[in-house]
Amino acid sequence: MATKKNKVKFNISNVHYALVIENADGTITWGIPVALPGAVSISLDPQGEPESFYADGIEYYVINNNQGYDGDLEVAMIPEEFRTGVLMEITDSNNVLVENASSETGKFALLFEFDGDVKKIRHVMYNCSASRPSIAAKTNEDGREVQTETLTVKARPLATGFVKAKTGDSTKASVYNNWYKSVYQPNTPEPEEPTEEPTS
């Protein structure tokens, strides 16, 4: 029986983030994904254009230049856990959130999904950072309008080169169902052993 395939996508939901853990040996792992509720929109544009190398009077070689993605994640309101865990605001003894200019923001994986006409498409961006959101609001007029908050997100390649991953039409059910339990790590196939030619 043929696998049904999505024809369209719409809506963003189920946004999660997982803190990047840099181990002593230089390897990267991630914490358990945490829900980031209230997603309104996401827009991430690719960074890095292919560069051409010219020789012999022609375009001799095209150099790949994948620098990840930049863009915005708009949410209803940024949770305190994200502010303290990623934006590195601190909570004082009075439980007041304090922003310190000397604090370095944390890195995280960003997980989310789009609805499809057949099945939700799940994504992970492996190595993200976020800038501080703007402070903005306006007075109520005839009605009340919700004031959202926007994070500017930069998703950069890992040392391995991996930038992102997403589920496909035939992704294994076990991988799909566990997407938000831990950050998916690509299963790269082992290189094939060279076959020996028979001797005569």
Image (cartoon, rainbow, N blue to C red):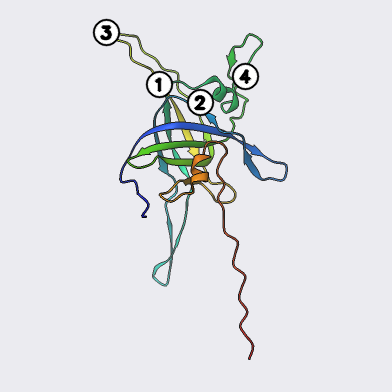
Q: Looking at the figure, which quarter contains the N terminus?
A: bottom left
Q: Nearer the viewer, mark 2 or mark 4?
A: 4
Which numbered dot is residue 90? 4
Q: Which label's residue is closer to the chain start, 3 or 2?
A: 2
Which numbered dot is residue 132? 2
Who's the residue at 49% across and 27% down the image? Answer: 36
Disc 2 + disc 1, Cβ < 8 Å: no
Who's the residue at 55% across and 23% down the image? Answer: 83
How far is the residue under mark 3 from the one under mark 2? 31 Å
**Amino acid type of the residue that numbered disc 3 sits on in the rendered structure:** Asp
Query: Can you give x and y, in whole percent of width and height, for residue 131 in the image?
Result: 50, 29
Q: Which residue is disc 1 drawn over?
A: 148
Q: Which label's residue is closer to the chain start, 3 or 4?
A: 4
**Number of other residues with Cα within 10 Å of mark 3, as a class: few under 14, some 14 to 19, many 20 or more:** few
**Amino acid type of the residue that numbered disc 1 sits on in the rendered structure:** Thr
Which numbered dot is residue 142? 3
How far is the residue under mark 3 from the one under mark 4? 37 Å
Q: Element type at marker 1?
A: loop
Q: Element type at marker 2?
A: loop
Left or right: 121 with respect to 31? left
**Number of other residues with Cα within 10 Å of mark 2, as a class: few under 14, some 14 to 19, many 20 or more:** some
**Number of other residues with Cα within 10 Å of mark 4, as a class: few under 14, some 14 to 19, many 20 or more:** some
Query: Can you give x and y, in whole percent of width and height, for residue 69 in the image?
Result: 45, 42
How far is the residue under mark 3 from the one under mark 1? 19 Å
How far is the residue under mark 2 from the one under mark 1? 14 Å
Please name whichever residue, 23 or 135, is drawn nearer the observer in this view of the structure.
23
Q: Which label's residue is closer to the chain start, 2 or 4?
A: 4
Disc 2 + disc 4, Cβ < 8 Å: no
Q: Residue furthest front?
A: 1
Q: Element type at marker 3?
A: loop
**Amino acid type of the residue that numbered disc 4 sits on in the rendered structure:** Ile
Q: Nearer the viewer, mark 2 or mark 1?
A: 1
